[in-house]
Amino acid sequence: MHKTRAIKDRLFTLYILTTSTLALIPVLHLIFVIVIRGFDSFVEGGIKFLTDVPPTPLSTELGGIGPSLLGTLILTATSLPITILIAFFAAVLANEFPNNPISKTVDIISRSFTSIPTIVVSMTVYLLVVVPMRTYSAIASSIALTIIALPYAYAITSAAIRQVPLMYREAAYSLGMTRWTTIYKVVVPITRRMLSGCVLITMARIMGETAALMFTAGRFRTGISLQLDRPIDAIPLLIFDYALTPYPILHKVAWGAALLLIIIYFIIFLAVKTIVKEVKL
Amino acid sequence: MNNLIHAVELRNVSIFIGKTPIIKDVNIEIPTNTVYVIMGPSGSGKTTILRLISRLIDLVPEVTVSGTAKVLGMDVLKVNPYVLRRHVGMVFQTPNPFPHMSIYDNVAIAAKINGVAANKEELDEVVKSALTKAMLWDEVKDRLKDYPHTLSGGQKQRLCLARALAMKPKLLLLDEPTASIDPVNARKIEEVIKTLKDEITVIMVTHSPHQAARVGEYVALIYNGGVIEQGSVRDMFLNPRTEFASRFLRGEI
């Protein structure tokens, strides 16, 4: 009996290890290819790769992705805080007042938005924002990105808040804390690690989104612009556009841009994970 | 509030969850500055009564309450629950110190929320006094900045007791506070309870008649949502009036 159990246990462990490795191989392969190819672009372009404008198709110099990098940072900086703020309050509302009709509506809308194709969001924002403004803009792009990232942020924030055991809320209430005091003094600090993970996942969603920007950003990559009501560019959009061209130099820029996107994300990921300590229950 | 004869008065109180009655027509009067024990078998409604007294019953979905419930002179069903809870401390069955706060902060937060201390010196004094009353000061005085996960289960429960005491409550509710801890820590908590009645009213829920006899002055025996018998501990243990009480006290139920 004991032997049969041991064999079953080993077989199951082997199965888990094999399937986990199979799932990881494509991801690792992708990262490996991006690092190898992107590194070449970094070496060739040097520090100017981060600041210069992209090359023309027949150019001999690699140039850089300055406008796209700046655009990605601007779009992340404008849409991430708004997304997180709305998602947090919606999640608090849905969890703390589950029977409230507004909570139920917010919950249903957020869940249904998860499955809307991002290109549809982009087209809708085009009609509602770009057409009236008569220009593509960072504002339109931020709105599209916020709409797309919001359901994800809401789902993860909601899960993080639900994860805090009821007994800590009860303890807080028994001390005379109000609901909001309980949330910011007890619930949020206990689940801070998971909430920081929520911010990171939302950030990754925003930084990596392409379709949302197709009808909203305007692909302004010939200079540096800090104006939110003017066209803008972003790294994923540049990668998408350049990958479709037949020019090797633009492919090279796209590989370098992909590596930069991964590096930026990992730096922020490691910084947040190091700073935000886990609470031991 | 200081001249109250009864800290708690429940008159014809019934509690329903949905359409299911959990508490049925309960009448209880709890004198001030006593240790009152609510005992009974598991699932008889003891904790529900405590949750009504602290208005934590609001957290239970689909609950309705009928009758009159007065706590420290306040109508429980009408008073602002946050105002009520500032006078009513509570210790739960499972130790629940805040895991993200240090031992010191766990106690200090109760004093801060309720405006018990005016400055840091007073706060330090309140924390020390609460931990001393909970018989925990000597064990933690050198590691007040440590987090509760470093404490044993019994120490965690005494920390929760200290936290409740730091509020300077007039009424302390204890929901089977020794159910999940070892006998040594359980005895310590019982010792603390006995010393508290000079200052505040204590209501303790337990399923153990032995514990009720050790710490209580008055007792109510609850079964199936109703009060079977109530009175002084001495009277009930020496002369139980009902067959159910006799059997419960003999440990047959």
Image (cartoon, rainbow, N blue to C red):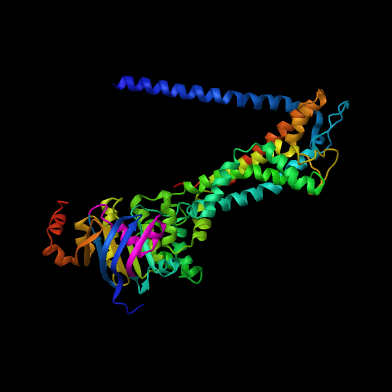
Q: Position of residue A162 (x, y in %)?
A: 48, 47
> Can you tell which quarter of the image residue B191 is in?
bottom left
Quarter of the picture holding the N terminus of chain A:
top left
Residue ID at (25%, 61%): B38
For residue A105, side relative to residue A49 (left or right): left
> Can you tell which quarter of the image residue B46 is in?
bottom left
Asked if the magenta segment contains residue B56, the reply would be: yes
Q: Is residue A186 visible?
A: yes
Asked if the magenta segment contains residue B106, the reply would be: no
* Image: B138 above or below A267: below
Q: Is residue B131 visible?
A: no
> Can you tell which quarter of the image residue A197 is in?
top right
* Residue with the most extreme bottom position: B3
Return the residue nearer the eye: B73 or A177: B73
Segment tinted magenta in the rendering:
B41-69
Residue ID at (65%, 42%): A148
* Image: A191 above or below A174: above
Return the residue nearer the eye: B57 or B140: B57
